[in-house]
Amino acid sequence: MTISKTQRGRAMAAMSLTAALALTATACGDDGSGTGNEGSGKGEITFWDNNGGPRTAIWTEIIKDFEKKYPDIKVKYVPIPIADVQSKYDTAIAGGGLPDVGGVGTAYLANIVSQEALVPVTDRIKESSLNGKLVEGMVDSVKTAGGRGDDLYSVPTSANNGALWYRTDLFKAANLEAPTTWDNFYTAADKLTDAKNNKFGYTIRGGAGSIAQALDAVYGQSGITDFWAGDKTTLNDPKNVAALEKYAALFKKTTPSADVNNDFTKMVAQWDTGTIGMLSHNLGSYQDHLKALGADKFAGIPAPIGAGGTRVQVSNPVDGLGLFRASDNKTAAWKFIEFAASHESNSKWNEAAGAIPANTDAAKDPWISKTEPTALAAKALTDGSTKIVQLPYYLPDWNNISKADNEPEFQKLLLGKVTAKQFLDKIAEELNTAQKEWKDLGH
């Protein structure tokens, strides 16, 4: 019998859950959350940054501010590469060594919650200075992603909306309109390409993280606004199949051939140093573009508007800070979370990252309007002009299905080894199965 990658992923999650429950049974002390203790509120706590490297400088600054305010608490900072964060958490849940506090995105929150590794923080928020100070939409996204009703399993800190970055200087030289519609996007991709001279209209993500970008393009063009139609996903709807066919056809025609293996780091670096017209990424790369190109050579806009006149985007993960059950000093760990999500710290972090703050006071700070891509993204998400397709982050299998299990399949699609329909049908079947299993558990 052949075991699919998804089945293997479920088996690994089940083993991790068994191990976590075993650790719970043998752990000393109990604060009502399973393991660990509230602690003295002093001493050292460990913090895992779920995007270690790009965000290390700003976290180092915030940690220094925190330790100045709370001299009896020291924070051990551990940067985790974003590509490794879920496997790092899974390994630590199974074998021990979890941090007190960790960065947790909604894309893999359900997987960690299902292994009972996080403490619900709903009541702690209500009793803290954060009560009423968190953007409602981000709070709702975290609740939905956790899959446990109204319980919050992380404190939201930011939303990193998708953006279409384009070279304003190249568009002006070619007398092209900004890629505000999908028609303009495809026209520009074609006209800015001169492959013989290593000039391309677009760079497509073929390596790690490719599927999220592709889904944005698919739903953005099809105009479908719901991920589910009953208990079946709309992913392989004929309109989505047609949209993916058109999008994937850009590869090697208006994109570099190296794109088939490029993750976001390589893709961003390639765009910043080359003569490529457009790049789909999130707001997080704004500072990289600014440093490499200068403010007068590029711009960033939300996803292009579809043929029906509406902008459709898939939901972007909300980042947050989780409090781990295994912590023996939850009091100190919570002080750090509350401090990091406060007005000043949250504003400072998001300005450095180019993301949208979760703290409502930080979201009103002047730098938002001065950073055009962030301002446009925030406006698009709040003025009703954008329809959001809510991805099923609540499914424990979501991250496996949408990443490791099928990213190699997307590369096959780009290389012409599978069709768009075959690719979407495969993922749709896996998601329908995962949804049924989730509902069978009583959700």
Image (cartoon, rainbow, N blue to C red):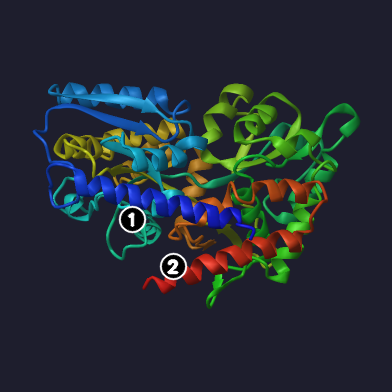
The residue positioned 68% from the left and 41% from the top of the image is 205
Total numbered labels placed on residues in the image: 2
User: Looking at the picture, does residue 138 appear above or below residue 171?
Assistant: below
- Residue matched to label 2: 438
Query: Left or right: where does residue 437 sit relative to residue 289?
Result: left
User: Looking at the picture, does residue 152 appear above or below residue 223?
Assistant: above
Query: Left or right: where does residue 213 sit relative to residue 390?
Result: right
Q: Position of residue 54 (x, y in %)?
A: 48, 27
| Extreme residue in the left direction | 40
Q: Position of residue 266 (x, y in %)?
A: 65, 30
Q: Tell me the kind of residue under disc 1.
A: Val
Where on the picture, by quarter, is residue 100? top left
Query: Left or right: where does residue 53 sit relative to residue 306?
Result: left
Q: Tell me the kind of residue under disc 2.
A: Trp
| Extreme residue in the right direction | 196
Q: Which numbered marker is on residue 152?
A: none
Q: Nearer the viewer, residue 274 or 44?
A: 44
The residue positioned 83% from the left and 50% from the top of the image is 416
- Residue matched to label 1: 139
Label 2 sits on a secondary structure element that is helix
Q: Nearer the viewer, residue 361 or 336?
A: 336
Quadrant of the image containing the C terminus: bottom left
Q: Is residue 277 visible?
A: yes
Q: Position of residue 377 (x, y in %)?
A: 51, 48
Q: Is residue 227 visible?
A: no
The residue positioned 47% from the left and 69% from the top of the image is 437
